[in-house]
Image (spheres, helix red, strand yellow):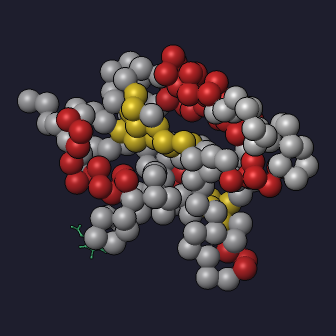
Amino acid sequence: MTVRGIWGLPSGTFLISLLLQAAIGANATNILDLPTEFRQLSWSIGGYSNLSDTITLPNILKIFNPHLVGYGKRSTVSYRPAALEDAGLNLAVTGANTLLLPEQVRRLIATLQILPQINFQEDWKIVTIFIGSNDLCDYCNDKVRSGLTPHHPPLCAPSSQIITFWIPVTVS
Ligand SMILES: *[C@@H]1O[C@H](CO)[C@@H](O)[C@H](O)[C@H]1NC(C)=O
């Protein structure tokens, strides 16, 4: 029997996220902690503890599907390579802007294709994208490239198309 979880998704559901949900400084109690990426606490992909302890999307999904794969488990340090068993499929890069999104999407696809726990073609995936806050800072340096000028096509459109085209059975 296939157990159906939230939104009627099959039990093979797993969760992925990328971009600007590195949760940098999320649990910092002093200035030395600010470069720490608290990937286990990110609302969209952190899987620290359980729902009574930490409210995140994966902790909600875990109630319906204990076999959820991909959530962040431990903190990582900005600008250093993060191990898959710590970051999970949280491929967010601290400081990234929307122009760097396609590169991250391609890295996500490459990672998904080699992940032993999943069936790339058939397992359901949830991709959340949260990007743009650094674009606001970029606006001061280059108004056109930042994409924040009126009538500029949305910078994230190519990345959405890559996801839809290249990752099968996905909610994004
Ligand atoms: C959730 O985590 C807390 C803190 O680690 C623990 O005390 C509690 O037993 C856990 N609840 C469940 C349902 O596992």
Q: Where residue 127 appears, x then y in whole percent?
A: 46, 37
Q: Where residue 48 appears, x then y in whole percent?
A: 41, 63
**Relative to residue 162, is residue 4 depicted above or below?**
below
For the N terminus, the quadrant is: top left
User: In the figure, is residue 36 to the left or right of 148?
Assistant: left
Question: Which residue occupies 54% across, 42% down?
Answer: 129
For the residue pair 167 and 67, the one nearer the viewer reads as 167
For the residue pair 135 and 67, the one nearer the viewer reads as 135
For the C terminus, the quadrant is: top left
For ligand 1, the image quadrant comes to bottom left
Q: Quadrant of residue 77?
A: bottom right
Q: Residue extending furthest left?
A: 1
Q: Where residue 43 appears, x then y in whole percent?
A: 46, 58
Q: Is residue 147 visible?
A: yes
Q: Is residue 80 visible?
A: no
Question: Which residue occupies 20% across, 41% down?
Answer: 5
**Relative to residue 105, is residue 137 depicted above or below?**
below
Question: Which residue occupies 67% across, 47% down?
Answer: 132
For the residue pair 151 and 164, the one nearer the viewer reads as 151
**Relative to residue 147, is residue 31 depicted above or below?**
below
Q: Residue extending furthest bottom?
A: 30
User: In the figure, is residue 109 to the left or right of 46?
Assistant: right
The total number of labels drawn is 0
Q: Quadrant of residue 117?
A: top left
User: In the figure, is residue 116 to the left or right of 133?
Assistant: left
For the residue pair 114 and 142, the one nearer the viewer reads as 142
Question: Which residue occupies 33% across, 57% down?
Answer: 59
